[in-house]
Image (cartoon, rainbow, N blue to C red):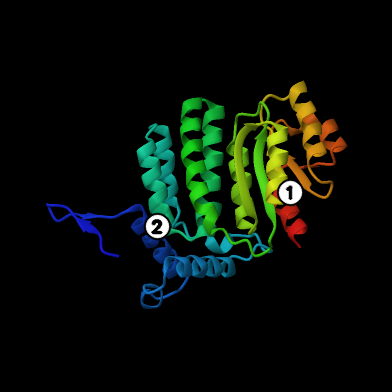
Amino acid sequence: MRPIRTATNRRLYSDADVERLILLRRAITAGRTIGFVAGLSDSELYSLVIDDEAKAYAPAHPSTDNMNTGIEEPYFSACVAAVKAFDGGALKTALAHAALGLSRPALLEKLLIPLIQTVGDLWCSGEVRVAHEHLASTIVRTFLGNLMPFAAAHSGSRVVVATPTGQRHEFGALIAAGVAMLENWDVIYLGPDLPAADIAAAARLTGADAVALSIVYPAADATLCEDLYRLRDGIADQVLIVAGGRSVASYGKVLREIRAVTLNGMDELRRELQARRH
């Protein structure tokens, strides 16, 4: 890797160079020596990082007490400050630095998931506006999408994650995608406000084992009820449907009728994914 130099002798790195540097940093964090990994091709390096990080974090034991080193705190604080300042560039930079400094499990469990939850709480309390939430969700969604190719899928299990028709708040779905990634599921993230026909089509086309829905607001929507019935009709009986979020209880009747599992938190989602994978 030979970066281009400007007329003032400053180094310029391409996107591919940056991706390789991130992978090299993750490989070293996992215990590899630079002498061992420097000569690997990009594809070999991808595979090595995936295998090393999968071994370093056993999904069957979700406790992350051994990761409470506090090393993620500066990244977290920088991300929250960037959101409050409505500074998308600063948020992207903070996340890029975190990707270099943290392993994938720590990045998801200790930074991204708490960040998404914190921004949601800030919005609920009125400390930030809905525009701040949308800015953060867009950047985090893109960042998660760039991480997903590196997610280990040793179990062969696949989950489609989305919010159904009329549900425009996607933070819960983003958290669910992060939890599924930590459990080594292959995640197909579709985003917010998607009709049941499209969610079902995605599940069929990808051979998904599960569909995860986030239902936050509104709490009583007849259109959504009809859409949930269409979702079950559009996918195979053996495909698991899980649903969580602040308004999920108000759709309890229809969720029971479509044989969906209602979740009261991400720990329950984790347990469902573990049980389904095993």
Residue at image x 61%, y 56%? 182
Residue at image x 73%, y 58%? 274
> Cβ–Cβ below 8 Å for labels 2 and 1?
no
Label 1: which residue? 210
Secondary structure of the residue carrying tag 1 is strand
Dot placed on the residue nearer the N-terminal end, 2 or 1: 2
Residue at image x 46%, y 56%? 70
Label 2: which residue? 19
Q: Is residue 58 visible?
A: yes
Alpha carbon of mark 2 to alpha carbon of mark 1: how far? Answer: 30 Å
Compared to residue 273, the image places residue 136 above or below, namely above
* Residue 114 image position (x, y, % from top left): 54, 45
Q: Quadrant of residue 189?
A: top right
* Residue 36 image position (x, y, % from top left): 40, 77
Quarter of the image where the C terminus is located: bottom right
Compared to residue 217, the image places residue 77 above or below, namely below
Q: Residue furthest bottom?
A: 36
* Residue 79 image position (x, y, % from top left): 42, 43
For disc 2, the neighbor class at 10 Å (few under 14, some 14 to 19, many from 20) is: some
Q: Quadrant of residue 228?
A: top right
Compared to residue 72, the image places residue 254 above or below, namely above
Q: Give me the disc on residue 53.
A: none
Badge 1 amino acid: Ala
Q: Is residue 220 visible?
A: no
Q: Nearer the viewer, residue 183 or 11?
A: 11
Secondary structure of the residue carrying tag 2 is helix
